[in-house]
Amino acid sequence: MKNILVVVGSSRKNGNTDQLADAFIRGAEAAGHNVNKVFLGAKKIGGCLGCNACRYGKPCIQKDDWAETVPLLESADLIVFASPLYFWTVSARLKAFIERFYSIAQEDPDPPLGRYEWYPQKDCALLLTAADDLFWTFEQAVSYYRFTLVRYIGFRDRGILTAGGCGSTNGRPCIEKTGHLDRAFAFGQGIYAAKKSDLVPELEVEPW
Ligand SMILES: Cc1cc2nc3c(=O)[nH]c(=O)nc-3n(C[C@H](O)[C@H](O)[C@H](O)COP(=O)(O)O)c2cc1C
């Protein structure tokens, strides 16, 4: 049994991304995992101000909802980042949330080349929704996830689910008309399965 935190970077409650995250959560809970969810659309979490107070042992100076999410981050084995695609990358809400990781970094006396601090060691996964469904649709968002969260912060990738063709935000969410919710359920159910291939249908983007 793992502790899973799902962070939803959408403002639309029960929108495409929220539904995709909930399907993942149902699957993970069916497999016996304990899941917490943070819906960023209901939180006030600003991007990092670069004041560097946290680098001098002080808490983040921003008095917003970030602090209440830190214990959830700390207790999670797996953090699932869910976002609608906004201008070909993750939403500003999710990006702002990730920027605040700066305040939980610790000094690393011996960092590898290109990293300057130490971050808590977690597993991670990515869920994305978009209107388009072309071969390049998710390229920037996936690249950001891989370089920032996996390569730089050092989280261990458990997989990526891209859900294209969900329709624009000019109307009701359409994700239920696609097969993505079933795929997300299977992804959640199988994310720690011994033989993942039994449960997880082929993903568009495989973990590297
Ligand atoms: C500001 C904005 C930018 C968007 N940019 C893109 C985009 O670059 N590519 C795309 O395919 N869809 C884009 N979309 C559509 C959303 O990604 C898509 O409708 C998504 O599933 C919405 O998720 P939600 O229901 O969780 O808000 C954009 C929507 C908005 C509001």
Image: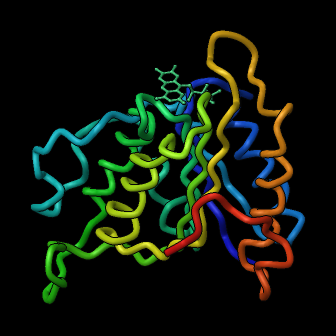
User: Ligand 1 appears in which quadrant?
Assistant: top right
Task: Say which of 17 and 93 sits in front.
Answer: 17
- Residue extending farthest to the front is 135
Q: Is residue 183 left or right of residue 101?
A: right
State whether residue 116 is above or below residue 24.
Answer: below
Residue 36 lies, with reference to residue 157, above or below; the image says above
Residue 71 spot, x, y in % from top left: 50, 60
Q: Nearer the viewer, residue 22 or 162?
A: 162
Q: Is residue 154 left or right of residue 55?
A: right
* Residue at horizontal 39 percent and vertical 44 percent from the top: 97
In the depicted structure, whether residue 118 falls above or below residue 45: below
Horizontal and vertical percent position of residue 89: 41, 39
Identify the residue shown where x is 53% and y is 66%. 124
List the single residue furthest toward the right. Answer: 30
Q: Report x, y in % for residue 12.
A: 63, 24
Q: Specify the quadrant of the image occupied by residue 108.
A: bottom left
Q: Could you say which is closer to the camera, residue 31 or residue 103?
A: 31
Q: Is residue 123 left or right of residue 116?
A: right
Q: Residue at x 70, y 30 (%)?
A: 166
- The quadrant of the rendering that contains the N terminus is bottom right
